[in-house]
Structures are given as C-alpha cells and as structure tokens.
Image (cartoon, grey):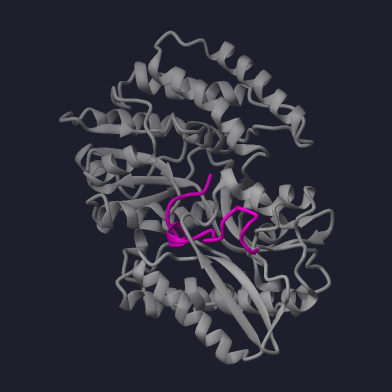
C-alpha cells in the first residue's frame, strides 16, 4: 500500500489511452528537432494548482539547463493504477520514464519490461548519496532497474491533548503493544465518544496494518524464499489477540468497525481518537482536511521495537528506451527529485511560501553530507512543530525496516478477513483464522 501524502498523492499516471488505436506514450523516436525526447509521468493534475506549478517550473528550469533534452510530461490521477499498470506495460503504452511503487520493482523486471540502468547509473550524480536500503529495492539479481524518489516508514500518530486529558505523559508515547493497550484504555475512559486506538479492517487496509503490526513484533508475512505464508505463528496470534482484546475486553477501539483510512483520519482530526498507525505524511491531511491542529499531533515509532514497514516510490525506464533517453531520463530525475534542499520535493523555501508543510520527519532519502544539507534546509524553513516528531526519528534508528510482501494486495485482501473478524466477532477463533489465511496465501504465492 502507499501511504497518503508526500504530495505524491496529487500526482499522476498518464493521460494516455490503453486503446491501441492511439499512439504509444513511449516516444519511440527519441529525437525531436535534434533533441532527445523523453516522456515521463506522475505530473500533478491541474486541480493540484500549486504542485502543478512547481512541477512545470522545475521542468522548465531543467530544459533551460539541458537545451538538448525535450521533456513531455503526462498527468492523471493517481500516479499508478494497479488495475491498468500491467496492461500499459504489455501494450507498449508506458512512458519512457515511469512511476512505480517499491513493490513493483521485481515484478516489472520479471515480466521483462524494465531497462537495465546499470551501465548508466554512474552518470547519475546523486545515486551514491541515496539510502542503500532504498537503492536495493530497485536492484534485482545485481542489476539496477530503478531510482527511488521517496520513502516512508510506519509509526504511531497520537493526540497529545487527549494524552494529557487522560493523565498520560504526551512526551512518553507507548513503546510496546502492552503500553499502547493500557494507554488506549485510559483514553477511551474519557467517554463522550472518545476512542483510544483505531485500526483499519477493510479494502485491503486491514491486511496492510496487520503486516505492519506483525513486522513490529519481529514477524514476517511470507518466508524469505517467498513461497510460504508465515503468519500462523506466535507473533501472528499476538497481533490478532491484541486487537481482539482491545476491542472486546477493554472497549478501547469503539463499536464502529470495518474502518478505512478516511474514517480514522476523520476521527483523529476531530479530536476523538487517541492513536493510530500511520506514516508522517498523514499529518498535513489531518490538519488541512480533517480539522486537526499541528501542535496536538505527535509521532512515535512503531510499538514493539523490532521492526517497521517501509514503502515509497521511484521511477523505472521503459525497456524500449534508447541509451540517449536513459541518460536524459537520469538527468531529469536528478534535477527534479534528487537534489538536497532543491527540486520538486526538496525546495523547502518554495514550499513554505506556498503554505505547504515543511519539517515533517520524512521522506528521508539521502545519507551523509547530502542528508545533512537537506535536513539543514528543511529545518531553516520548518513551519510545523518538529519537536513533536523527535521520538519517531530517534526510535526509528533501532528498528529493522521491511518492505511489503510480494503479491501484497492479494495477501492484504486475505488478511482483511482475519482482522475484520476479530474486530466484529467476540468469539472469533484466531487459530482458525490464521490457518485459513495461511492456506489462501500459500495458494497466491504458488500461482505467482
């Protein structure tokens, strides 16, 4: 799953039709008036006026710096539609440089639709400054097939005002699931419709959060070789048992269940929810769309202390792209997204002037001197209470990061049933739920 925010939620897949009657999105002929022409996607739609303006400004500055390159950007919403993604690739309709989620990388390589960037990546100035774990996501069998653009990790958003009201220390968020359960119970005891902890359990989002909660306890959804489910374990039982007990024994999760992200965000924004799992990019949405206040919203690392789910996005290249197009595309990515304190996602001074939030703890793309420069510019332009996120930054340093499992959406659909069952049925048989889910996941993995 992708998280919600990072401005990439405004971004686009393509206006290209899947119909073979129209011309392909990929440029085919890579020259136009003596220039190298590249098509790219994930341009913000016109409805996202500020981001659209920034994106167009950055393309214009790139073309001014590189007059021998012509960039043709396509927009739509969202950046990638899983329902049409494979069809666009197979039908030759994909752009020369195209947006992907982290979970797409190996799949695109496996179906032979990605260009091998290994011979060219040395020309990408910023590549060695990017976090190794993010680079590894786009490295398959020792070859480089993509460039990361953003990354996020899951944490715990909590309401400082409700913590204080419940007699809890807002500077000491729960570090374990036992502590979270105790804090949720105290918050729910405030009454007046207040919920201590909320979780998703529909539209594949319950399976997504089950995965994050399992990772936090040191477990895995799928075996290392990708062939078997590994959820019917003590860690898997602990995840469902904890949710069941908070729902039925503690009554700290409220009576309304089968929630999805918008429901939970609405609860948090209205001041009626103490905690929920999320990435930092939810915070601006809670403020700008759901009525929350930055000063009340804080972020802690995942309870459990063992791991956190990471996700994000990047760009891959059409296997039909010419060497000149690959070189041009890498230069474009470097200019747009991979300059510390600059570019579409990193020009914090420009974002601040546009009243966009600056100072959130993620995305954290760079390492070393590049990261230091990026953080320095971010800090100088911060317009949100950065101290509210320090616990998240400090705690994440000791957590093992794990990407989503293969066939994530199919697996999440299976796990949704287990999560929703324990939240809606007091007598749910956790052992049977996990046994059934394991069998279905094994079938999914066998067919992939």
Q: Where does the image place residue 78, in percent across and percent down from the top left?
A: 48, 54
Task: Decide: is 122 above or below 269.
Answer: below
Pick the quarter of the image with the C terminus. top right
- Return the residue nearer the eye: 104 or 194: 104
Residue 380 visible within the image: no
Which quadrant holds residue 50? Answer: bottom left
In the visual, does 45 lie left or right of 233?
A: left
Image x and y of residue 296, in percent: 26, 52
Give left or right: position of 205 versus 298.
Answer: right
Q: Quadrant of residue 139?
A: bottom right
**Going 69% across and 28% down the picture, which residue do you hit?**
444
Magenta highlight: main SS: loop
Q: Which residues are magenta?
A: 1-23
* Residue 234 relative to residue 79: left or right: right
Q: Which residue is most to the top? A: 427
Q: Nearer the viewer, residue 436 or 306?
A: 436
Nearest the viewer among 402 and 10 is 10
Q: Report how many numbered discs are placed on residues in the image.
A: 0
| Image location of residue 345, percent across then percent down | 48, 71
Q: Is residue 3 magenta?
A: yes
Residue at 34 percent across and 75 percent down: it is 352
Q: Nearer the viewer, residue 445 or 241?
A: 445
- Is residue 181 highlighted in magenta? no
11 vs 189: above or below? below
Given the current orientation, which residue lies at the most extreme left position? Answer: 192
């Amino acid at each position: 799953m992708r998280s919600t925010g990072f401005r990439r939620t405004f971004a686009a897949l393509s206006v290209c039709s899947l119909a073979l009657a129209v011309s392909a999105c990929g440029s085919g002929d890579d020259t136009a008036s003596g220039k190298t022409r590249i098509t790219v996607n994930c341009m913000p739609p016109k409805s996202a006026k500020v981001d659209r303006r920034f994106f167009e400004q950055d393309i214009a500055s790139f073309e001014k710096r590189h007059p021998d390159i012509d960039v043709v950007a396509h927009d739509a919403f969202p950046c990638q539609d899983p329902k049409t993604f494979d069809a666009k690739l197979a039908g030759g309709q994909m752009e020369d440089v195209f947006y992907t989620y982290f979970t797409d990388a190996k799949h695109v390589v496996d179906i032979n639709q990605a260009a091998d960037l290994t011979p060219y990546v040395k020309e990408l100035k910023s590549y060695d400054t990017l976090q190794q774990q993010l680079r590894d996501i786009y490295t398959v069998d020792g070859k480089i097939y993509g460039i990361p653009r953003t990354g996020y990790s899951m944490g715990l958003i909590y309401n400082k005002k409700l913590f204080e009201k419940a007699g809890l220390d807002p500077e000491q968020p729960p570090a374990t699931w036992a502590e979270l359960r105790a804090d949720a119970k105290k918050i729910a005891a405030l009454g007046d419709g207040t919920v201590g902890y909320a979780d998703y359990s529909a539209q594949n989002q319950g399976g997504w959060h089950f995965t994050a909660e399992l990772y936090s306890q040191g477990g895995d959804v799928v075996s290392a070789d990708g062939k078997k489910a590994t959820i019917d374990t003590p860690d898997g039982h602990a995840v469902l048992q904890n949710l069941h007990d908070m729902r039925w024994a503690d009554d700290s999760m409220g009576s309304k269940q089968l929630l999805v992200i918008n429901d939970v965000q609405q609860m948090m924004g209205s001041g009626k929810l103490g905690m929920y799992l999320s990435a930092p990019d939810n915070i601006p949405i809670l403020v700008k769309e759901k009525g929350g206040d930055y000063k009340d919203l804080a972020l802690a690392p995942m309870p459990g202390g063992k791991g956190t789910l990471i996700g994000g996005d990047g760009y891959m290249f059409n296997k039909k792209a010419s060497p000149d197009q690959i070189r041009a595309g890498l230069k474009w990515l470097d200019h747009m997204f991979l300059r510390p304190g600059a570019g579409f996602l990193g020009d914090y001074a420009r974002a601040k002037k546009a009243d966009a939030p600056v100072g959130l703890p993620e995305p954290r793309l760079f390492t070393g001197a590049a990261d230091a420069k990026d953080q320095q510019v971010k800090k100088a332009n911060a317009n949100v209470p950065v101290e509210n996120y320090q616990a998240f930054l400090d705690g994440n340093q000791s957590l093992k990061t794990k990407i989503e499992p293969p066939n994530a959406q199919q697996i999440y659909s299976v796990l949704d049933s287990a999560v929703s069952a324990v939240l809606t049925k007091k007598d749910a048989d956790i052992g049977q739920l996990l046994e059934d889910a394991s069998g279905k996941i094994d079938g999914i993995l066998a067919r992939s």
